Amino acid sequence: MEKYDVDPKEIESLWADGGEGLRRFISYSRRDANLAQRLLLDLRLMDKYIALSRASGALLQDIVNGGQSGMVENLLLRRFGEGNRVVPPKPDADLSEERYIDSDELKGGAVLVPEKGLLEDIVILDYKSLYPTIMMAHNLCYSTVVPRGQGPASDKTITAPSGGRFVSPEVSPGIVPQVLKELLDQRTQTKRQMKRATDEERRFLDAKQYAMKILLNSFYGYSGYARARLYSLDLANAVTSFGRENIVKTKNIIDEIGSVYIVDGNVVQKSDLTFGKSVGKRFDLSVVYGDTDSVFVRLKPLQGEVTLEEAELIGKKIAETVTSSLPQPMELVFEAFARRAIFLAKKRYALWVFEPSGEAWKDRIKVRGMETVRRDWCDLTSKTLNKCLELVLKEGKVDEAVDHVRFIINRIQNLNLTDDPEILEELTLTRRYTKSTSSYKNKQPHIQLVEKIKKRGGQVPGVGDRVPFVIVKGKSSRKNKALFVDRAEDPSYVLEKNIPLDTEYYVEKQILPPVLRIFESFGVTKDRLCIGRGQSNLFNFEEMAKPQKQKSLFDF
C-alpha cells in the first residue's frame, strides 16, 4: 500500500475547500490511519507489548512509552522484596551526573581484529544469551557484590577479570541469576511449545519468547545505566570482562584444534583418528574475526569445496568442544555459514550467509556497519552498495560491480530531472528536526533549510519530524566557497524551480566513499570507477566498450 501524496503546503487549503479538496484530504488522512494500523497489526506490536507487560509486571502504557529500565525495575522490585531487601529510590540529577562521569570506566566487549578483504567458507558461531548466562554462571548480582577493600579473596568468592568480587552461590545465591534462569527456562519451554502449536497459538507464543529475550538482554545494560535504582559499575564491568576473557579463550581453543577431518559422516580431530583407518576429508581452521558473542571460523579444505552439510557438521563440533570447557549454562552454538565475506574493519563487514531453516537452507546478504542502512546516506548510495555486494558476494563478479558503479556515476553526472524525476527521491537525504532552530549551536543543512522555508512562508516541519533535503549547486569562488550546509534545499522546490543539483557532491561524497571501501579489497581504484571525469562529465564509452576478459575472484 502506498501513501496518498499530498504536499503539506496544500493541506490547509484542502481543509478550507469543503468540496472535492476536503474529500481528497479525508482520503489522504484515512489512508495514513489505515497504514498506521496495518503496521501495528503486521508487526504484531500489540502482541509484543502485552507479552512484555505480562512478563515484567509493568503497566502496558509504561511498556509503550517507557524504556527497558522500567521493565527490569518492576521485576527486581518484586524479587528483592520477596527476599526482604530494600531497593534504593531513583537517583537525583546530581547522582546521575556522577555516575555518567564514572561510566567512562565501563569497558565493553572484546572485538578481535578481522582478517581484512574477501574470504570464503566461514562458519559463524554464536554464544546463546552471552551476558545473561555469564551472570548466571558466575553468580553476578547486586546482592552478591563484595564491596571493594572488604576482606581477601577466598574460595567463597568469585573474582572477575576486571577485579570485582562476588560471593559464590554456595554462600548466597544471587537474586538476578535466579530471575535470569527463570526467564531463560521459560523462553526455552515456549520455543519448544511453538513447534507443535497451531498458527494462532504460535503467534502468541512467539510474542512471549520475544518478551523473554528482550528482558534477558536488558539486565546487563541496566546495571550500568546511570539513572537506574540499582546501579553497579563493578557488576557491569565484571560481565564484560568475563565476555572478553571468554572470546580470547574460544579463539585459543579453536587454534589448538587446528584442523578436523570428516570420516564416515563424523567430525574427528587429528588426535582422535583411529590408527590405520582412512583419514577422510581434512579442513584447516582459523579464527578470522570475533565480536563480543560471535566467532567467525574459516574452513580451508585440502581438496574440493565445502558443502553446507559439512560446514554445519564442523560448526556444531567446534561449538560442542568449546561449550564443554564453559561453566553452565554458557553455550556456544552453530549459527550460520558464510560462503563469501568481506571484512573492512572491526564491526564493519558483509556476508553471504546460509542459515538452516527446518530441512532447507535460507540465504541472504547480511551487512554490519556499512552504508546500506544508515540514514545519513541517500537511497541511491544504499541501492548501489547493495547491488555491488550482491554481484561480488553471490556471483563473484567484481568487474560487473565496477561497471554498475560507473553507470550510476554517469547517471548522476548527466542528471536531467525532467527526463529522470525518480532520481530526485533516490538522492534525497533526511535528518530529524529535534529542537527549535535557535537551539542549534552549529549550522546543519536541514536547519538551514527550515529557515529558508520560514522566509518563503511555507509549511515548516514540526519538531520531531524528519526533514528531507537535496544538495544544490551554489555560487562559489576561490575566496568564497558556498558551504554544504547552505546548499540544502526542499526536493519539491527544486523540481518546481528546476534548480540544478550538485552532482559532484553526490559522486564524491555519497557514492564513491562506501564503494571504494569495498573495492580496495580487489585493488580497484577511484580512477577505474571514474574514467574520463578529469576532462568532462561524460564517461569514455569507447574504453568501456573494449572487450575485457571476465576475471574470477581469485584474479583479485
Image (cartoon, grey):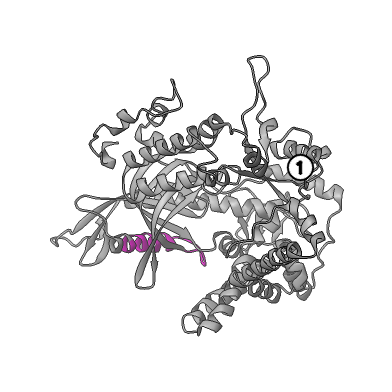
Whether 157 is drawn above or below 211: the answer is above
Residue 33 image offset from top left, x and y in percent: 69, 68
Residue at (38, 36) in percent of width and height: 521
User: In the image, residue 6 lies at what x, y percent?
Assistant: 68, 56
Tell me the quarter of the picture where residue 124 sits: bottom left
Q: Is residue 460 magenta?
A: no
* Residue nearer the viewer, 441 or 484: 484
Q: Residue at x 35, y 35 (%)?
A: 522
Depth check: 161 or 514 in front?
A: 514
User: Is residue 313 highlighted in magenta?
Assistant: yes
Q: Is residue 87 visible?
A: yes
* Residue 232 left/right relative to 415: right
Name the kind of residue labelled 1 in the image.
Ile
Residue depicted at x 43% and y 46%: 289
- Which residue is label 1 attached to? 101
Q: Is residue 80 visible?
A: no
Residue 14, given in percent of the width and then of the height, sits at 77, 59
Residue that extends furthest to the front in the rendered view of this protein: 19
Residue 443 falls in image quadrant = top right
- The 10 Å Cα crowd at callout 1, few under 14, some 14 to 19, many 20 or more, is few
Quarter of the image containing the C terminus?
Answer: top left
Given residues 277 and 191, the one toward you in this image is 191
Q: Looking at the picture, how far across and down is residue 66, in whole percent?
A: 75, 63
Q: Quadrant of the N terminus?
A: bottom right
Tell me which segment is drawn in magenta: 312-331
Q: Is residue 240 left or right of residue 349?
A: right
User: How many labels, in total?
Assistant: 1
Magenta stretch secondary structure, dominant = helix
- Where disc 1 sits, the SS reads helix
